[in-house]
Amino acid sequence: MSKIFVGDYSLEQVGKTVTVQGWVANIRDHGKLAFIELRDRAGILQVFVDESSADFDMVHELKRESIIEVTGLLVERDAKFVNHHLKSGQVELKAEKIKLISQSKDLPFELDAYSHTGDEIRQKYRYLDLRREKMTSNIMLRHKVTTAIREYLNSESFVDIETPYLTKSTPEGARDFLVPSRLQKNQFYALPQSPQMLKQLLMGAGFDRYYQIVRCFRDEDLRGDRQPEFTQVDLEMSFVKQEDIQNLVESMLKEVVKKSKGIEIEDKFPEISYDEAMTRFGSDKPDTRFGLELVDLTEIEKDSKILFITKALKEKNGSIQAINLPQGSGKFSNKELGNIKQAMMEFGITSFATAPVEDGIISGGMKSTFKESNAQVLQALDAKDGDLIFFVTGRKDKVQQALGALRLRLAKKLDLIDPTKLNFLWVTDWPLLEYNEEEGRYQAMHHPFTQATVGSADELKASPETVKSYAYDIVLNGYEIGGGSLRIHERDMQEAMFQLLGMDASDYERDFGFFLEALEYGFPPHGGLALGLDRLVMLLAGEENIREVMAFPKNGVGRDLMLESPSSVDEYQLSDLNIALK
Amino acid sequence: MSKIFVGDYSLEQVGKTVTVQGWVANIRDHGKLAFIELRDRAGILQVFVDESSADFDMVHELKRESIIEVTGLLVERDAKFVNHHLKSGQVELKAEKIKLISQSKDLPFELDAYSHTGDEIRQKYRYLDLRREKMTSNIMLRHKVTTAIREYLNSESFVDIETPYLTKSTPEGARDFLVPSRLQKNQFYALPQSPQMLKQLLMGAGFDRYYQIVRCFRDEDLRGDRQPEFTQVDLEMSFVKQEDIQNLVESMLKEVVKKSKGIEIEDKFPEISYDEAMTRFGSDKPDTRFGLELVDLTEIEKDSKILFITKALKEKNGSIQAINLPQGSGKFSNKELGNIKQAMMEFGITSFATAPVEDGIISGGMKSTFKESNAQVLQALDAKDGDLIFFVTGRKDKVQQALGALRLRLAKKLDLIDPTKLNFLWVTDWPLLEYNEEEGRYQAMHHPFTQATVGSADELKASPETVKSYAYDIVLNGYEIGGGSLRIHERDMQEAMFQLLGMDASDYERDFGFFLEALEYGFPPHGGLALGLDRLVMLLAGEENIREVMAFPKNGVGRDLMLESPSSVDEYQLSDLNIALK
């Protein structure tokens, strides 16, 4: 039986005498009568108290955020006093008895929605920060989301299986958090970056459909939406095709959105290939809530006589591309355009220019540049008078990246994004490998367990740079919220993959030998996906940082400001572990 | 829509042509026809194949544990071939097409229920071990248990909230696992032993009802049912009395037993005090599936003239106690009794003796000892001819412990325990503190956040050794499966508690300052409980080690024999963390 919270009271309970507890969110003390806004996790209930109550004097001493217990009659409010902003706005509690349960001292910051409080102080007093309506509702939303996920997956025969957190350090991937072992001197556990191999082994064990909502750890330098620990909805299925997994995840996400936000998404999620995403949006996680697509002018301009264009197109993969901003002309100061140019150049492109469309032609400084190709360029860009065109030249991949970033910047600047939209998108047909120029070797675009679309190890080795994979990302509003793939389930393919990644047999036998052997005892074809729970909830909550949907997050350098963690430890603790500070 | 697994097929699907995948559990190859036992997580389906199938030749090459895909007609078996041991025993699949998906090499051990395989090899090839029917069903049971828990708590307005795993080392409690921080040089996170303070802070934040199924970590020397990481069902409630929490947990456990095992427990769980548990059973977690209760003969024997008794009773808290084993006479060899005596003496008791009851009196070597008190002793013990009485003298607490252990040993030896029983028991009214003789200070019987039954810090300090607490353990079949308490929610009480535990203000301000401050901003009265999920599932599964209900457990010295973890790491990894091996 669920509890009736003070914020839940409504006309249904009118006429009842009830005893409730809650926090004093506010007091309007009129001397002979007072109104108390009593709060709990569900919201606010107005308490009315006057001199007829024996405890009335105490009300004058009450501080905000103190806890009281009130016994009284729940009455209907006069129509003119109904508060439509509150669930309980049609009723109020006429206090007969008020008991002080816990007096609060003065708060370090205000808890109302309007006060802007620094992140540091919010984190230090997180237990106060979480009392704010927005934070309470974010944490409740997270619970609704995980509950909807579990209910959906349980109904689809998935088994929730816990995998260990004290696991093994492997050289692939990001930096591991290490845990020194005391019983196994000079050896270390690693906290998992994901339970990838373990969930695959559960497929080998025959569980067929596995999931886990599981903490993952990466010791990276932190950015806005990164935390050293984060939560993944991890799932894996056997005997399935890529579309089976995509369909399942799509249905699950629709359920989640419906149950947590009350929004029904009926259309199938659009799906585009990685190449198309890069070509049209300059991003592998495009935000499709607005247009401003990239237009490749290379073909149109291939015979151009203009020096900066001929120079750019002469290079390998040289390219000229543009974005048209409808009615963008005159919306930017020279300083702003200078800043944009500056940001563009950091992507390694060779030139950047803007041009307004006037009197049906590309105008301004670019007038002569496109004299020959005016009509074709305008048509390709669907550009009209008053538009502003952004041109970029350089190596195709760099141009795409630069324009992908520009596209987002322009949309934000001109407020082109509808924040109520939830645009899910599948990005598929990923390359299996990418070449890491710094390290002079291939690395896995997803991870080393991803299955190539070719059928044999020989084919894979013959053309590693063009091989595609059965990998798929799920994108929401320009954020990658999940990624998955069919996995390799044959030893020879897995060995070929390790070799392509630059490992020799002694390397991969040491780190992955047990896994390779497992593939030889009857291993099913399988695949799966991992969703970033924090990001998904962040987007559903309309937040811009995953900290806002975590109860106790860490700051930008990995500190918990409330616990004061990490902290120095006693010498004997290190000595027990046989380690020393350097 | 749930998946139909091969083990699920039944008369319902007869007449359908189906395509299924599974593992070859067994083949009976009769040359011109063959029966394949096809297995997946739900069980076995018999596949019949004969020369009419184009793929028949391949069947002769099939190895056990290979994966095949079979397409064929599901038919009803002849009545005489029905297998009542299988869910699918009334049907079989007449194979039309068989495809080999993954051939297995020879197995390192047999997967049938009868083979006894060493723990080491089972762990090394855990993905094979998990294919065994018993292991699959244990993991599925665990899923059913956690699902039932979540469904129950969700329906009771609990919110699932994740707390961090990278947290702070505190000196109280067991040894922490430490995680060196790279970004905060020379500082360490600790993996949580439980989210105790964080869940209390969530009460301070107003969430009112919290739960989490959460991993906990203790770096202890391992024993049979201990693992370095284990899972806790952690819950906390605000504005409640002890009985509210007990009632809720009791209803939850009844739901769990019903949904996971189909067993309805109607009676209220019995409840006894800690003192009564120690007095009657010599244990704070009594197994009540059998009798053999302790009987204190001290009062009866207070005027005894027998030297070993007078000597024992002269000591502070001196005591003579006994257990009567009905019809135990003649069931033990002298060697066995010697072993028992040996084990008893290790508890620090001063004497141990046994005596049979013959011709209505205590007989054997004890005949003269109880000459005066024969009738009283026999009556107190409810002893009859043929019974065997075990007498112990010494300090009362040591005698209780010794007889508590003896009681279990006798019950096992004489097979007095009904393994089908699920005897839940509340143990309440715990002492707040216990005196640690080695360290010469008090320590918390539960933990330092437990609320005493006295109302003020002064009362608490006046008689710390006799103060009881609002603490309660839930016991199942002699295992503590959970413990909880009402918590301190007032700063002065919490400080008094820290002081009693031997901390001075600078100690507790450093480690718990943030928590003490939190208590000053309107903190609700609250309490909760933590269940050991592994133990609960172990007992419901009828297992004797929690390893049997964990997918990837560690061995007795904390090693994962499959992953080969912990392992040595590269020098640069340590260097990044600014630590070195000693």
Image: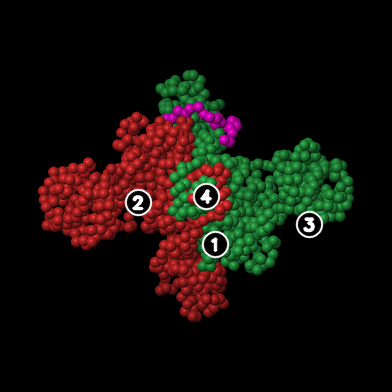
Chain colours: A green, B red
Q: Which residue is mark 2?
A: B479
Q: How many angstroms separate mark 1 from mark 3 (CA)? A: 40 Å
- Magenta part, dominant SS: loop
The reply to the same-chain question for discs 1 and 4 is: no
Horizontal relation, residue A116 to residue B435: left or right: right
Secondary structure of the residue carrying numbered label 4: strand
Disc 2 marks a residue whose amino acid type is Tyr
Q: How many angstroms separate mark 2 from mark 4 (CA)? A: 41 Å
Q: How many angstroms separate mark 4 from mark 3 (CA)? A: 48 Å
Horizontal relation, residue B279 to residue B261: left or right: left
Q: Which residue is mark 1?
A: A510
Name the disc covering residue A316, or none.
3
The residues colored magenta run: A101-120
Q: Residue at x 46, y 71 (%)?
A: B26
Q: How many angstroms separate mark 1 from mark 4 (CA)? A: 23 Å
Name the disc covering residue A23, or none.
none
The reply to the same-chain question for discs 4 and 3 is: no
Secondary structure of the residue carrying numbered label 3: loop
The reply to the same-chain question for discs 1 and 3 is: yes
Q: In the figure, residue A488 lies in which quadrant?
A: bottom right
Which mark's residue is nearer the viewer, 1 or 4?
4
x%, y% of residue B329?
Answer: 19, 59
x%, y% of residue A343?
Answer: 73, 43
Disc 3 marks a residue whose amino acid type is Lys
- The disc numbered 4 marks a residue on which chain? B
Label 1 with label 3: CB-CB less than 8 Å: no
Q: Earlier in the sequence, mark 2 or mark 4?
A: 2
Report the front residue among B137 and A126: A126
